[in-house]
Each structure stands twice: as C-alpha cells, then as structure tokens.
C-alpha cells in the first residue's frame, strides 16, 4: 500500500537534499542559502522495499498571511493536511531553535504520525543537537545525514513503526509496455499513446501568470502565486485528469516553471539554477506552452524561448495571458497571430490562444489546442501520400542547378514522428540550398497540416559506383 510523506521544517535544514536522495534524482533545487524552496513538490520515492510519495515543502517561517512568507506557509500546511505521516526535520548542528519549537506544536496538532529527523548528524559536533531534540516532544529523534545517506536504515524502521498498515509490502508483477504499432507504407499512422500522461511544460518570462493559469486549470490553489515576479523557482509537475468536451478523460502532467529572463540579466545563483530547471522541463515535455503577457507580447526573450522549444523538437502552443486587459480584442488577436507567423517561421501556424488565468476565459480552447498540436506532433504520413505530393511539387518548382550539376530528388519518407522527421533521397543533395529545403518544409506544413510543430529533414544521397574518390581531369 502506498502512502504520502511530507518533509517539514524551518528553512535550510536539508529538506530538499533529503527529497532528492529519496527520489533518486536531483529534482529539487538545493543551495546553501535558506528559502530556496517555495512551492511544494511531489516525487515518487523508494526506500528499500517501500514505495511512496514524498512531498518537499518550503521552510516554515512566521509571517502575515498576505505576505509571500505567509503564502508559502499556507502551501506547507496544505501538504501537512494531505500527508499520511510527517518527517519533521531539524539541523542537529544548530540544535533546537525557538522556530523549531513553535512549529513542532503546529505539526503535533495535525494529529498525524511524526518522525523526528536530526539532519546533518554526520559529525560528533551534532550529538548535543540530537539529545536536545527530545525537548520537542515528537518521539525518538533519528540521527540522519541527507547529504551522505547515513541513517536510511533507521528511517526505514521508523516508517514501518509509524505506518504499520501502509508499509505492508504487496508484490505485483509489473506489466511490460506495449510495443509501438508498425505502420504500413500505404497507411497514415500515429505514435500517440493516450494511456500515458501528456507531459506539458508552461514557460515564459517572469510574472506572465504561469502559476495562476495552472491553479485555474486545476481548480485549486496548488501553486504559490502573488504580485511579486520570480516567485516560482522549482519546476513543479502536477498530475491530474482532464475531462474534454466530448467527455473523454485524459491523464496529464503539467510543469510550472520559473520565469526565464535574458541570461545576461541573471546574477543570482538560485535564479540560474531555476532557469536550468525550467530548460530541463522543456527537454522532457511533449508539448510546451509559451505563455506571453498579452499587454507586452513578443518581447525578444519570448522569441528566444520559442526558438529553444523548436530546437528541442517540442510541440508548441502560444498562450496570450491577461487577455481580459486588452481592448478591441478581435483586431488585436488578428494582429498578434500575423505577427507570430512573421516572427516565428520555424513553427509557422502554431496556435495562438487568448486566455485569462485570473478569470478562466479561454481555458477550454487553450486545452483543446494542446491536444490538437500533440496529435500533430505524433503524426506519421505514409510514404505513398508523401511522394504523391512530392512529385508535382518538384515539377512545379525544381531544385536549382549548382555548379552545372542538376540536383535530383528521387523520393521522400517519414521514418518517425515526435517531431515529424523526413528523409529525402536523391543525387547531389549536399548542394541543395537551404531556401529549397524551406520551400519543401512549408509545403509539408500546409499540405499535411503540420502546424505548431518543428519539422526535421535530412538528406541521403546515392553513391556513384564509378567514382573512386580521386579527382580526374577531363580533356
């Protein structure tokens, strides 16, 4: 039986380090300065034969509910309410502080099983802090070192004791993933697998409203929001089921990411780590939503972000957030869609969706655009259809001759999707101009509806059997 464990404690006691150790990946941002974590982050953790959900939370600090500190604490209190047990962590080198004592009372009132972890206990200097932890009244303190992995056996025993029912291990045979279907030459196909969650990354400049949008889609205040720019630091993935207009339910995993500024403007180490985490979320996503502030759209940084999405080969949806602030909306939308096609030729035709994360306007059309572009990203076109299009296209506009040699394109095929990838076969293809490749890409996009996705093309020439590699002079 699975269970949920929340890591609670004041700032800089090592909660994110423990989270990373239990999930086996460096998912949470870690730095020496306190207060790096702000949102709560969930991960699939393993400890020996136990599998469970671990929740990393912001450091507990006192503050008014309206302040950023107060909103961070509200997120931590929500994690406490959803957890089956609590890992209350202190810094053994510092010992018990008044803040530890205050929040120990908070977790005690939650009525959940509590495991007291004395982190940073790898040295003899921490022994006094471990003994001091008895004063919190949370049971036996467990000496631990999240950095070095010491005390994992003791943590395992404490979990079995705190949650005897949930930690009863049931062994199930894992089902093997189904093999991808094989497509014939004369049938179009798709690599779309609706049984797996659709991974979506929401990226954009700071204060574009990414967290507000995700909260609106989820229908709850899951992510920390506020008027301050740069609140989000970790890339937080949230899994949920979305019911479409046709009543079908789709599993999704949406990643809220830190705002991306120009690299030259980033000087803070934590912001650099947050930006790297956001870029990593783009690399692992299938669909990337580039969220723009509709009041100041298509800044240079927005174009840079879209270029990153294109280079990584991800499907793209452009969201125009804060649309409720725009006057004369119909004319403005037409103008921005034309501007998108002009500024972003590498993903020409990408859906540009007006919406408001604050009011919820346009959310349904926005979600349908995500599903549509994901289907396009997974599309495979049969070799027969491709070449029935290619032949008249080449006859209408043949490739130019280069240095007196005629470039001959024989046929084209699509070996894979995600994103659509095409291979051209022929002679002298190394000399094929970039402009002609762009002509073919635009034709593919318009003919087969490949809007909003990058298109990859490679060339494969045939070897001349009479050429031995030496240059010969003809007289």
Image (cartoon, grey):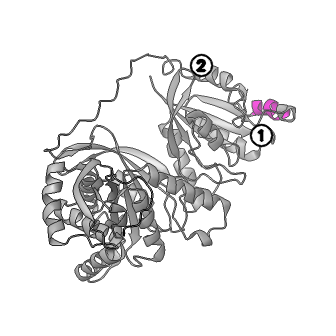
- State which quarter of the image contains the N terminus: top left
Q: Judge from the rendering whether residue 210 lies leftward or rightward of residue 386; answer left or right.
A: right
For image coordinates 18% across by 66% down, the residue present is 394
Q: The magenta stretch spans which residues?
A: 128-135
Cα separation between marks 2 and 1: 24 Å
In the image, residue 129 above or below residue 314: above
Where is residue 185 shown, x and y percent of the image?
17, 43
Mark number for residue 119?
A: none
Q: Residue furthest front?
A: 475
Count residues near mark 1 (Cα–Cα under 10 Å), then give few for <14, some for 14-19, many for 20+.
Answer: many
Where is residue 16 shown, x and y percent of the image?
62, 43
For image coordinates 14% across by 44% down, the residue present is 187
Callout 2 secondary element: helix
Report the predominant secondary structure element of the magenta stretch.
helix
Mark number for residue 161?
A: 2
- Mark 2 or 1: the one toward you: 2
Q: Is residue 132 magenta?
A: yes
Q: Judge from the rendering whether residue 373 lies leftward or rightward of residue 226; answer left or right.
A: left
Q: Are marks 2 and 1 in contact (CB under 8 Å)?
A: no
Where is residue 300 shown, x and y percent of the image?
47, 76
For image coordinates 27% across by 68% down, the residue present is 406
Callout 1 secondary element: loop
Query: To which quarter of the image does residue 159 belong?
Result: top right
What residue did someone put label 1 on? Answer: 96
Can residue 354 be spotted in the picture? no
In terms of depth relative to the viewer, which is nearer, 43 or 466?
466
């Amino acid at each position: 039986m699975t269970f949920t464990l929340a890591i609670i404690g004041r700032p800089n006691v090592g909660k994110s380090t423990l989270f990373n150790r239990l999930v086996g990946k460096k998912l949470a941002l870690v730095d020496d300065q306190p207060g790096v974590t702000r949102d709560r982050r969930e991960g699939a953790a393993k400890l020996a034969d136990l599998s469970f959900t671990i929740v990393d939370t912001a450091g507990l600090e006192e503050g008014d509910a309206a302040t950023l500190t107060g909103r961070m604490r509200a997120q931590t209190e929500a994690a406490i309410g959803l957890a089956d047990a609590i890992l209350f962590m202190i810094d053994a080198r510092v010992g018990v502080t008044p803040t530890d004592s205050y929040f120990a009372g908070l977790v005690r009132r939650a009525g959940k099983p509590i495991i007291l972890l004395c982190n940073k206990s790898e040295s003899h200097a921490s022994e006094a802090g471990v003994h001091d932890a008895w004063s919190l009244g949370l049971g036996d303190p467990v000496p631990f070192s999240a950095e070095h992995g010491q005390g994992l056996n003791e943590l395992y025993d404490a979990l079995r004791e705190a949650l005897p029912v949930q930690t009863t291990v049931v062994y199930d045979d894992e089902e093997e993933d189904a093999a991808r279907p094989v497509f014939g030459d004369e049938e179009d196909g798709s690599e779309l697998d609706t049984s797996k969650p659709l991974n979506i990354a929401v990226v954009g400049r700071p204060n574009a409203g990414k967290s507000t949008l995700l909260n609106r889609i989820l229908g709850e205040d899951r992510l920390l929001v506020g008027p301050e720019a740069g609140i989000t630091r970790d890339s937080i993935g949230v899994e949920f089921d979305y019911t479409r207009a046709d009543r079908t339910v789709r599993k999704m995993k949406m990643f809220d990411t830190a705002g991306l500024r120009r690299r030259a403007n980033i000087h803070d180490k934590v912001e650099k780590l947050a930006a790297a985490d956001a870029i990593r979320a783009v690399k692992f996503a299938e669909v990337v939503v580039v969220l723009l502030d509709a009041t100041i759209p298509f800044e240079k940084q927005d174009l840079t972000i879209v270029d990153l999405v294109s280079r990584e080969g991800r499907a793209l949806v452009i969201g125009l957030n804060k649309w409720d602030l725009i006057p004369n909306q119909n004319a403005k939308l037409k103008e921005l869609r034309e501007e998108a096609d002009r500024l972003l030729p590498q993903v020409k035709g990408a859906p540009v969706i007006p919406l408001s994360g604050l009011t919820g306007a346009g959310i349904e059309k926005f979600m349908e655009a995500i599903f549509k572009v994901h289907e396009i990203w997974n599309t495979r076109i049969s070799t027969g259809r491709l070449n029935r299009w290619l032949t008249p296209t080449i006859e209408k506009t043949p490739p130019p001759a280069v240095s007196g040699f005629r470039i001959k394109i024989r046929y084209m095929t699509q070996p894979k999707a995600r994103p659509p990838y095409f291979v051209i076969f022929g002679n002298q293809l190394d000399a094929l101009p970039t402009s002609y490749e762009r002509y073919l890409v635009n034709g593919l996009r318009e003919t087969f509806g490949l809007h909003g996705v990058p298109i990859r093309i490679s060339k494969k020439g045939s070897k001349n059997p009479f050429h031995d590699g030496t240059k010969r002079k003809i007289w």
